[in-house]
Image (tube, rainbow, N blue to C red):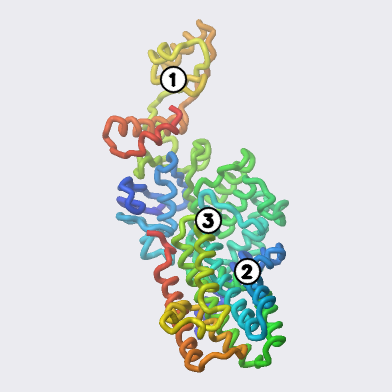
């Protein structure tokens, strides 16, 4: 690797570290009381399943809460970026600088993920109390799925943020898409419940595949063919939405 | 003779399907090492021009070159050498002044050591050091605005854009910013393009300026050139009592500001008017014309032309309402 490339990578990493630290991590450290808001929805659903369900239902709840926490944070990127663009004009400052749209997206997405880390950590810690399936491989699988889900939903959030015209619309849109991605599809329940003729509807939602893979990783009954199919579909969704964010998001306005 | 750092050639910008162009065949040139000011009423096209020049927006037609590079094709290189304080920007609430300036530098890839030193220096220059550790949400609007300016200045780029930078600043704060901008130009050779509604600011800072209206340049040059070209050798006489408006119109063009009538006259008429005022014990004051007068004259004439039907801009009438003529 040449010196110039090494220097460029170092600069990009410094940029990502600075933006994610100052936009997300530092505010979180300064106002830690914000954290419960991040996982209030997934943990509420988990609580309902815990109170009303038995055995597997709770594990589905945990798997769903992981997917929802990550996807919600990815989508929140859209609302936060809209806020930064419209209310603070921060995107104007960033566009008129050497920071690329991809770097900006990753930076703010990283800061969103930082907010999700405590919630994910709590969920990871409670998994072994409800299933005996946790191995090193499970943890690696979970990390991979979380990573792909985060990139995919962040790309959706970033793409939306460049088109939405005001902050209010952004927050409402994100809330709606969050339901479409995390509540309606089989995120907190098994895919098999959905009748065959309607299953394609679930299959076109990226978080369905995230949840299938997490459900499989924590030992819930999932067919091997469905797992293979989801391992194919989730990265594909990631590539599609990342491409959409890179090539169709409005960085320079027309 | 300094070379041009920005060249706009027949620049046109339409937003969406809007039939009224934000920029309409705009030609403009900014020389290196200058402070260049854009003046114009709200909606005149100043911010649109700045957004195109800072590669945030693409023009509908025409070209805009920055450092000789096309603002679209050369955006990547241009972005490395510019920084902007956008209009009506707000700092991030949970960050303090020091965080903001550090962020502006670190996101451009500066090392933490160098960024920290620069941040401290700029905060000191703009007298923000006592607020360095105060969250921006606890600061006044003027201090917040100074933080945004500090972010741009700290970047140490060749070309800075400041869109209405001193809005909300108190007179002392404004002068701090002015002094720093002048120092940056004189000592470091920076080029600064700013937009403002404050004529005193334009007069105090600008090497050259352009008055824009309806997306095209109505007048440009040094403040003195613009004044003399459009106001000639006129003198302004402010009259607060002793004359009716119709009586004053006999001396020259009259503009009313509340209880004050401003009459633009040549030297001889000013002398006659002052004698007449003395005879009537009327209260008057005489002074040279300012950029403010030239601005009202230039933009006011453009509105008159609109009213005569030379421009079919539907917004012309409503915009005129804000003119206070």
At a point 50% along the width and 70% down the height, the residue shown is: A180
Left or right placement of residue A152 versus residue A23 in this view:
left
Left or right placement of residue A144 versus residue B9 in this view:
right
Reading the image, the residue beneath label 2 is A41
Residue B264, compared with residue B49, is above or below; it is: above
At a point 60% along the width and 85% down the height, the residue shown is: A142
Q: Which of labels 1 and 3 is toward the front?
A: 3
Disc on res. B263: 1
Q: Secondary structure at mark 1?
A: strand
Residue A177, compared with residue B260, is above or below; it is: below
- Residue A217 rendering spot, x and y as whole percentages: 59, 89
Quick one: which residue is furthest to the top in this view? B279
Q: CA distance from mark 2 to mark 1?
A: 68 Å
Question: Badges 1 and 3: C-beta atoms under 8 Å apart?
Answer: no
**Subunit that carries the residue with mark 2:** A
Disc on res. A168: 3
Question: Badges 2 and 1: C-beta atoms under 8 Å apart?
Answer: no
Q: Which of labels 3 and 2 is toward the front?
A: 2
For this rendering, which residue is in front, A126 or A199?
A199
Q: Secondary structure at mark 2?
A: helix
- Kindly indicate whether the residues beneath marks 3 and 2 are on one polypeptide chain: yes
Q: Please say whether residue B314 is visible from this viewpoint.
A: yes
Residue A46, compared with residue B144, is above or below; it is: below
At a point 61% along the width and 63% down the height, the residue shown is: B103
Residue A213, compared with residue B142, is above or below; it is: below
- Residue B256 rendering spot, x and y as whole percentages: 46, 22
Q: Locate residue B100: give its quadrant.
A: bottom right
Q: CA distance from mark 3 to mark 2?
A: 20 Å
């Amino acid at each position: 690797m040449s010196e110039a490339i090494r220097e460029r990578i170092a600069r990009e990493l410094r940029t990502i570290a600075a933006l994610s630290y100052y936009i997300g991590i530092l505010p979180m450290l300064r106002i830690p009381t914000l954290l419960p808001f991040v996982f209030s929805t997934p943990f509420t659903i988990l609580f309902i399943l815990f109170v009303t369900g038995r055995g597997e239902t709770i594990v589905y709840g945990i798997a769903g809460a992981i997917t929802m926490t990550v996807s919600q944070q990815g989508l929140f990127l859209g609302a936060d970026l809209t806020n930064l663009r419209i209310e603070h004009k921060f995107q104007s400052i960033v566009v008129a600088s050497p920071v690329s749209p991809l770097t900006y997206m990753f930076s703010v997405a990283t800061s969103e993920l930082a907010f999700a880390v405590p919630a994910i950590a709590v969920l990871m810690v409670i998994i072994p109390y409800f299933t005996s399936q946790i191995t090193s491989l499970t943890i690696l699988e979970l990390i991979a799925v979380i990573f792909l889900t985060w990139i995919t939903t962040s790309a959706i959030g970033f793409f939306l943020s460049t088109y939405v015209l005001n902050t209010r619309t952004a927050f409402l849109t994100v809330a709606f898409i969050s339901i479409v991605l995390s509540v309606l599809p089989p995120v907190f329940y098994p895919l098999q419940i959905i009748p065959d003729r309607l299953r394609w509807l679930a299959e076109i939602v990226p978080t369905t595949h995230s949840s299938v893979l997490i459900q499989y990783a924590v030992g819930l009954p999932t067919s091997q063919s469905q797992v293979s199919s989801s391992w194919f579909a989730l990265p594909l969704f990631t590539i599609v939405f990342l491409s959409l964010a890179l090539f169709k998001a409005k960085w320079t306005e027309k | 003779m300094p070379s041009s750092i920005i060249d706009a050639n027949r620049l046109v910008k339409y937003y969406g399907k809007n039939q009224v162009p934000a920029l309409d065949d705009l030609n403009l040139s900014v020389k290196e090492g200058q402070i260049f000011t854009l003046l114009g009423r709200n909606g005149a096209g100043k911010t649109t021009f700045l957004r195109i020049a800072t590669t945030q927006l693409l023009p509908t037609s025409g070209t805009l070159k920055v450092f000789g590079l096309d603002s679209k094709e050369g955006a990547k290189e241009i972005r490395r050498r510019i920084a902007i304080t956008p209009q009506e920007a707000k700092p991030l609430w949970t960050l303090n002044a020091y965080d903001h300036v550090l962020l502006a530098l670190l996101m451009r890839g500066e090392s933490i050591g160098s960024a920290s030193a620069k941040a401290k220096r700029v905060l000191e220059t703009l007298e923000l050091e006592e607020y360095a550790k105060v969250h921006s949400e606890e600061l006044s609007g003027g201090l917040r605005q100074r933080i945004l300016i500090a972010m741009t200045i700290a970047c140490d780029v060749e070309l800075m854009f400041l869109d209405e930078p001193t809005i909300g600043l108190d007179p002392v704060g404004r002068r701090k910013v002015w002094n720093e901008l002048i120092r940056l130009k004189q000592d470091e050779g920076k080029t600064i393009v700013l937009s403002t509604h404050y004529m005193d600011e334009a007069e105090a800072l600008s090497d050259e300026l352009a008055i824009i209206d309806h997306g095209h340049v109505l007048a440009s040059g040094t403040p003195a050139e613009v004044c003399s070209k459009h106001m000639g050798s006129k003198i302004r006489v402010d009259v607060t009592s002793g004359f009716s408006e119709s009586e004053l119109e006999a001396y020259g063009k009259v503009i009313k500001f509340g209880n004050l009538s401003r009459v633009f006259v040549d030297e001889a008429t000013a002398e006659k008017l002052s004698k007449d005022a003395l005879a009537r014990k009327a209260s008057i004051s005489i002074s040279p014309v300012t950029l403010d007068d030239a601005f009202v004259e230039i933009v006011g004439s453009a509105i008159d032309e609109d009213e005569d039907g030379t421009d079919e801009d539907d917004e012309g009438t409503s915009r005129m309402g804000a003119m206070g003529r």
